[in-house]
Structures are given as structure tokens and as C-alpha cells.
Image (cartoon, rainbow, N blue to C red):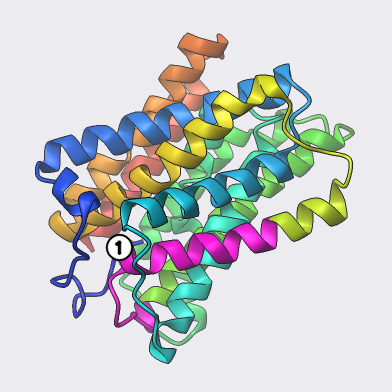
């Protein structure tokens, strides 16, 4: 979620900014935090009776609370011009994206979840063209390469189409990538006046309200058992506020191509941690598909 150029110079004051002195530290923090997130969520979901809706809701609640504490309770009130970006981040990315990933990771390996959820490019290019913006031929080719990577990983020819859980899980990951792509397009079309870091507490608050409402309606008997609280605290108080802030600051400091290459280390770390912690298989399909998705993103950034 890169901030707009017009606001990139106005970073909010406070501890988050002081923590980001070194670009290398920011990058390593983002890679390790998000890389460890999906294996941790999968452990919580498959070893306890934690519900994905409530786990996602607590994530947004704790992230909002953490950011409020770090900012000393001081918030900058968004203007009307900030509303599109604020809602896109809060509704599409922090709610739809992460909820779909939480639902999918129960049936899909954590490594695949990390890779496929980052394949937003397969949606960004056609959606941009749909809204009348001409895309370079190289970017269309990059989207096709990324789509080939998704197909190699999903292997639709090998899926038992009678397994509704697997079908729904892969569909949820495609929806997650679509939600991320829509977030990118909204921020590109209607860049906010405030820096994205200043919008984050508000966006997490919107996400928390939506997810709590959905959890109460769709999983009224669900919740988070004691065994899942370490993961909930890790995701909500560390990964969500600090990891997201690191990614936003990296998108401001690095060129699009370098940022794309660097951030692709996040799903790679998710794959490696899924193998190390959960014993997930790293086959040629995952390697080849991941490389194709990475290649597509690099090509798109070059165009």
C-alpha cells in the first residue's frame, strides 16, 4: 500500500518513525513478521478451536489499540479527501484480504497462502484497463506470467473438485488478491492527503468493527481459546501494527522495482517457515510457481 507522492514527505511523528531508522532493519522486520504470520495462524486454527472470524477480529482490535498507545492517544482526523483510501485500506485490505487468508489457511498450506495472497498483479492490470487506463504490453505479459505461477501452484488439474473445502480455500485466496488489487487501484486513483501511517489507526478501527459484526453473525459460538491467544497477541500487537508500518515506510524509501524484489522475500519466508515449523512440502510446483509470480511482479515494476 504505497502512500501518495504528495504526502510521502509528511510522516507522522512518534515512536514508529524513530524505530525505522535503517531500511535494512525495516525490511528484515517486515520479512520475518509477515513470513511467520501465516504458519502461526495455521497452528492456532488447526490445533485449537479458534475461529478464523474471531482471530481476524482480534487482530484488528489489538492493532488499533497498539497504534493508539504508540501515538499517545493522539490521532489526526482524516479529511473528506482521505475517505476513499481510508475505506479501501480498512474494508478491502485489513478486513477482506486478511479474513479470506484466515479462512483459506485452514485447508491450504501456509506457504501457498503466503504466495497466492501476494498475487494481486493478476487483478491489477485487467482492472486498470477496465477503467480506461492503457497498460504497457510488458505489464500485460507480467500479469500473464503471474497467472501462470498461480496455476502452477494451485494445479487445478490435480484438485479433487468434490473437496469443497479445498475449492473454497483457493477461491478465498483469489478473492484476497482481488481485494488487495482494488486497494492499490483506489489509492492510486484517489491518493489521501494524510500519510497512510496516519490513516492506519482509523482503518484498523473500521476493520475491527466490521470483523466483530461478521463474527457475531456468522460465528456466534466461536471465539479464541487460551491456546490460541499467543498467536492472537503476536499477530495483533506485533505483526499487524509494526509489520504494516514497515511495509508502508519501505514503499516510500525504495524504488518500485527494488521494493517489489525485496518484499517478495516475505512469501518465501512463509514457505520456509511452513516447511520448518509445520513440515509442509516444498515441491517443484511451489518453487516454479513462486518464481513465476516473483518474475511477473519484477517485470511489472520495470514497466
Residue 179 relative to residue 158: left or right: left
Query: Badge 1: few (under 14), some or many (20 or more) residues near its Cα, within 10 Å?
Result: some
Residue 164 sits in quarter: top right
Residue 133 sits in quarter: bottom left
Mark 1 residue element = helix
Q: x, y percentage for residue 99?
A: 65, 49
Does 56 lie within the magenta span? no
Q: Residue at x 38, y 62 (%)?
A: 73
Q: Magenta segment, which residues?
A: 188-211
Q: Residue at x 56, y 35 (%)?
A: 113
Q: Is residue 286 above or below residue 283?
A: below
Q: x, y percentage for residue 50?
A: 74, 30
Q: Residue at x 70, y 27 (%)?
A: 45
Residue 79 visible from this viewpoint: yes
Q: x, y percentage for residue 58?
A: 62, 44
Q: Nearer the viewer, residue 26 or 200?
A: 200
Q: Nearer the viewer, residue 70 or 59?
A: 70
Q: Residue at x 50, y 19 (%)?
A: 274
Q: x, y percentage for residue 51?
A: 76, 36
Residue 283 visible from this viewpoint: no
Q: How many marks?
A: 1
Q: Nearer the viewer, residue 96 or 195?
A: 195
Does 200 lie within the magenta span? yes
Question: What quarter of the picture does the N terminus occupy?
Answer: bottom left
Q: Is residue 23 above or below residue 209?
A: above
Residue highlighted by disc 1: 138
Amino acid at each position: 500500500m504505497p502512500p501518495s507522492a504528495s504526502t510521502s514527505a509528511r510522516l507522522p511523528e512518534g515512536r514508529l518513525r524513530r524505530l525505522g531508522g535503517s531500511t535494512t532493519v525495516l525490511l528484515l522486520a517486515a520479512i520475518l513478521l509477515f513470513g511467520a504470520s501465516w504458519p502461526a495462524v495455521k497452528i492456532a486454527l488447526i490445533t485449537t478451536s479458534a475461529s478464523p472470524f474471531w482471530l481476524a477480529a482480534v487482530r484488528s482490535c489489538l492493532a488499533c489499540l497498539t497504534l493508539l498507545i504508540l501515538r499517545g492517544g493522539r490521532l489526526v482526523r482524516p479529511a473528506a479527501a482521505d475517505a476513499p483510501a481510508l475505506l479501501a485500506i480498512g474494508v478491502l485490505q485489513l478486513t477482506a484480504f486478511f479474513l479470506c487468508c484466515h479462512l483459506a489457511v485452514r485447508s491450504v498450506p501456509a506457504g501457498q497462502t503466503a504466495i497466492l495472497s501476494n498475487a494481486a498483479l493478476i487483478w491489477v492490470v485487467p482492472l486498470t484497463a477496465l477503467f480506461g487506463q492503457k497498460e504497457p504490453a510488458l505489464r500485460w505479459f507480467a500479469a500473464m506470467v503471474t497467472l501462470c505461477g498461480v496455476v502452477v501452484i494451485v494445479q487445478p488439474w490435480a484438485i479433487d473438485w468434490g473437496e469443497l473445502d479445498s475449492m473454497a480455500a483457493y477461491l478465498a485466496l483469489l478473492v484476497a488478491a482481488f481485494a488487495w488489487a482494488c486497494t492499490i487501484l483506489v489509492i492510486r486513483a484517489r491518493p489521501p492527503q494524510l500519510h497512510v501511517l496516519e490513516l492506519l489507526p482509523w482503518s484498523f478501527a473500521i476493520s475491527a468493527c466490521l470483523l466483530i459484526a461478521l463474527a457475531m453473525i456468522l460465528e456466534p459460538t466461536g471465539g479464541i481459546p487460551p491456546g490460541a491467544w499467543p498467536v492472537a497477541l503476536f499477530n495483533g500487537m506485533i505483526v499487524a501494527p509494526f509489520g504494516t508500518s514497515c511495509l508502508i515506510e519501505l514503499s516510500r524509501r525504495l524504488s518500485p522495482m527494488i521494493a517489489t524484489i525485496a518484499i517478495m522475500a516475505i512469501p518465501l519466508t512463509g514457505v520456509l517457515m511452513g516447511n520448518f515449523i509445520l513440515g509442509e512440502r516444498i515441491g517443484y510446483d511451489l518453487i516454479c510457481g513462486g518464481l513465476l509470480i516473483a518474475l511477473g511482479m519484477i517485470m511489472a515494476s520495470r514497466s
